[in-house]
Amino acid sequence: MRNVGNYAVGPIALGGAGWSIYDDADDRESIRTVHAALDCGVRLLDTALAYSRSDTEGHSEQIVARALAGHPLRNEVLVATKGGHYRRGDAFPVEANPEKLRRDVEGSLRRLGVERIGLYFIHKPDPAVPFQGSVGALFDLQAEGMIEHVGVSNVTLSQLRLAQTAGDIAAVENRFSPLHDDRTVLDACAAGSIRKRPEHPSQPLTGRLRQHPPSQPVRPST
């Protein structure tokens, strides 16, 4: 097992984008998928505000909450979610100023049905906001007890260094695959004992190499 903060999690996480990005996904099947993953030993569930249906904000977070409600392994599961990046129709804007991040965290707390979020990421750096300001906002929310651990996603090495000046970064989620093989952030995570989570590690295996926003996975061919 590997640790993220105080949580013992394995090397595999279950991501929830596909439950919500596609409006035709079946909620019951998604919940069964979560339960099957927990039965197989998965203890890290990854979701995000951006993982929304066109008509339902935070739909993936709602699926996680429904799947974990009353589940005997609930207290062993680390739920990671992300903010500062959201869905508006078919667009995925980035807005990671401190006020918006506070609203995002408050919304995630309501949808997940928890008093504190285990791991919360800035989904993408906002070019209109100093990155230290965005990260600092999450550490303020951590101090208020709304977040247990802070993470950053889709960052460069210099952005990771800036984030580390604001506080302890528990995890980084960046693209890492045969098509995205930048090891600078990976090496920095290893040196700093930061959990590195690859985003879209198997994307080339789908056979569809189109570019997608970080919140939108490639749908496998059938």
Image (cartoon, rainbow, N blue to C red):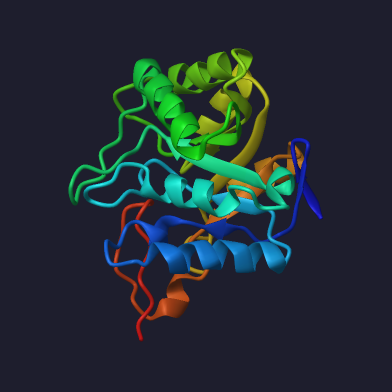
Residue 85, picture quadrant: top left
* Quadrant occupied by the C terminus: bottom left
Q: Residue at x 46, y 43 (%)?
A: 154
Residue 155 in the image, given as x and y percentages of width and height: 48, 39
Of all residues, the one furthest to the bottom in this rendering is 222
Q: Nearer the viewer, residue 145 or 83?
A: 145
Q: Residue at x 35, y 22 (%)?
A: 100
Position of 18 compared to 8: left or right? Answer: left
Of all residues, the one furthest to the left in this rendering is 89
The reply to whether residue 108 is visible in this rendering is yes
Q: Residue at x 42, y 50 (%)?
A: 60
Residue 89 in the image, given as x and y percentages of width and height: 18, 47
Residue 31 in the image, given as x and y percentages of width and height: 50, 61
Q: Nearer the viewer, residue 160 or 214?
A: 214
Residue 19, picture quadrant: bottom left
In the rendered view, would you say 105 is above or below 198? above
Residue 98, picture quadrant: top left
Position of 114 compared to 29: left or right? Answer: right
Residue 24 in the image, given as x and y percentages of width and height: 28, 67
In the rendered view, would you say 70 is above or below 141? below
The reply to whether residue 156 is visible in this rendering is no
Of all residues, the one furthest to the right in this rendering is 1
In the rendered view, would you say 100 is above or below 189? above
Of all residues, the one furthest to the front in this rendering is 70
* Quadrant occupied by the N terminus: bottom right
How many labels, in total? 0
Q: Residue at x 74, y 57 (%)?
A: 10
